[in-house]
Image (cartoon, rainbow, N blue to C red):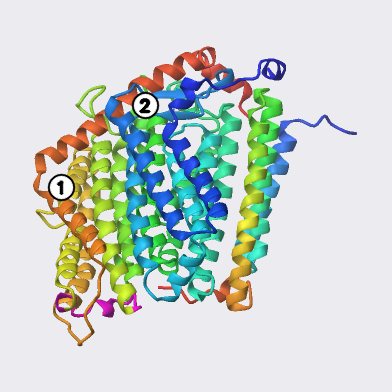
Amino acid sequence: MPQSMLASMWMPSAEELSQLAPLFALVATIVALLLAAMFTNRNRNVAASIVTLGAIGTGLLAWKRLQSGAPSWAGFDPNGMGPMLISDTFSQFFIVLACVFMLVVTAMWWLGQKSDLPDSEVHRMDATEFFVLFVGSAFGMSLMVSTTNLLMIILAVEMASLPSYGITAFRKKNRVAAEASMKYVLFGAITSAIMIYGASLLYGYYQTLDLATIGMKIAADMQAGATTGTLFLSVAVFAFMVGIAFKVSAVPFHFWCPDVFQGASIEVTTWLSVASKAAGLGLMLRVLSVIICAPSAFPVEAFKYVSLAIAIMAALTCTVGNLAAYRQMNLKRLLAYSSIAHAGYMLMAVAILWSPTDAGIGAAHPAFSAIVSYIIVYLLMNAGAFFVVAMVYWSTGSESITAMNGLIRRSPMLAVCMAIILFSLVGMPPLGGFMAKFYLLMAVWKGGLYWLVVIAVLNTLISLYYYARIVRAMILTDDGLPEISAPMSGQLIVAMCTIGIILTGVLLGPMKEIANNNASNLYAVVKSDVAPRTASAAGPSAATPNTENADTAPTIP
Amino acid sequence: MLATIGLQHYLILSALIFSLGVLCMATKRNAIGILIGVELVLNSANINLVGFSKYQTGKGDGQIFAVFVILLAAAEAALAIAIFMNFYNNVRTIDVDRGDELRG
């Protein structure tokens, strides 16, 4: 009731706030950046150091929570309307990944601003603004995986998107960057507007902003065999999913991806290629698992169509990505299409989230562990590949595939690492990319979507061609380009990524164990914590959802 | 004669504005025009939220949501227009069809 809301203003307790330490650390980093800019006359090295420290600090806080096995926490719940924020292994895992990747991108910025290309000029001048936007988008992505509340989801997606538009436009004098950022902001604004409209319909139909409650009400409706409002519901869910599909760059919402990746500076491209997609997938898993897992006994049949829709989207996404990558000459654009294709593979595992497993309650759903291991390997592969492209770019000023010609002579170390990374992107054994893809396709096979596995294997064959084209340019074509002067630290990062890829591939057992451990925790969170909590919170409304919905469901003209 | 205004009226208005917004986004070639379409869709969502909040839940959450959406729309418009300015400085137009350098 509004009166009681005003009478007893709700305040979070210190203990509640401490659960969100990683998020606060990111915000503190932004504040520190702005203050430091004021007092140090916008010193770029200070700004970069603050981001590095902030990323390490945030990562450690999240890592500590991940290791301590602290029970998952869902809070900020005034008036029993459902939790606003969640802190559990799932969110902490993604925050740790985001922080690791922030360090990679900051290192890339640090090395990139030393080159004498026009981009570096901008990076030297406006380092503070760049990093504020950059950490802002990292904060938004961390929020995306820490909530099941419709309002918070919208805010998180916008928090992640708006700074990303800004950093895409960062090369102000560059026509291509201007065009890319305009396409990005328009696509983003349109999809997020439609997403908000979908959220408003969901809110109106189920009268709550809490997704877990919505999930229970949907399940109760389905059990009762309610058919009214099905069209309304599917429009709402579809509209809501548009925003998430945009972040994952799933077909047909992928058009921004190649343009933005080509137009943005390489640091931004690297950041968006992994972080934006991982956060989008995290949000998608969170949303779907909360909706599916909330009810105790739900009819699996009812979700078959949603599963089919996502499976078709996944198949289209990886096919379109791989086919379009065929004729690309720009390395960033080629890697953009490759990242669309990889998003498609990961979406395949999302599609089996509905299939029941024989593992029993509390055990990992294979979809989770498959995606967790895939994201880890994907991060390593993309960080390495973009770092090599970046170093070639700094040294030659070209992002074309011809800039790679004869790399084996010009920088043997980079060429060998790049070849390993590319073969891992294809999915060749015994590299990490193969293991990750193998787990993923095994999971999809066991989930019963056999045709999807066939499509994935065909796609792998297609993708071999365009990845191999880069390898051919590096090894077989040599038109006498000068040697690459790659910075040592950059080479070290590439080497580390490559070693990581080899290790994840060779150490088959541990890899599977890590993924399973992480995923079983994630699943335990989804299964046992979220559902009972909201069951008690939703209380009476959950007990009689059908009559309530029948009374209050809006009649759509 | 005037009927009492109920939830239906809000929803019809919202659906109309949503359709106009989508139409605007689909047909305009000027970047500002597309942005106006986005604002229409956001406002139709706001009408939904406020209407549902008043007639269905009775809690304030929908109206709070609407306030946040207004805020988001303002932030988005500010950033989008800055980016359009930047595009204009480079291309001397904000016709989205002229953004054809990136393709394929």
Query: Left or right of A305: which side holds A149?
Result: right
Label tally: 2
Q: Position of residue A123 (x, y in %)?
A: 46, 65
Residue visible at 33% across and 50% down?
A101
Q: Residues within 10 Å of mark 1 (few under 14, many from 20)?
A: many
Q: The C terminus of chain A is located in which quarter?
A: top right
| Earlier-in-chain disc, 1 versus 2 | 2
Residue at the image position 63 percent from the left and 35 percent from the top: B65
Residue A42 picture location, percent across and down: 53, 59
**Closer-to-camera residue (B83/A311):** B83
Residue designated by label 2: A293
Q: Position of residue A443 (x, y in %)?
A: 21, 40
How far is the residue under mark 1 from the one under mark 2?
Answer: 31 Å
Q: Nearer the viewer, residue A56 or A386?
A: A56
Bounds of the magenta span?
A: A397-409
Q: Is residue A403 magenta?
A: yes
At label 2, the amino acid type is Cys
Q: Position of residue B103 (x, y in %)?
A: 44, 73
Callout 1–callout 2 Cβ contact below 8 Å: no
Q: Which residue is mark 1?
A: A504
- Residue name at image x 75 percent, y 36 percent: B9
A459 vs A12, left or right, is: left
For mark 1, name the chain.
A
Query: Does residue A92 lie above or below A460 as drawn?
Result: above
Amino acid type, residue under disc 1 in the picture? Thr
> Would residue A176 be seen by someone viewing this image from the given angle?
yes
User: Does the magenta-highlighted stretch encompass residue A547?
Assistant: no
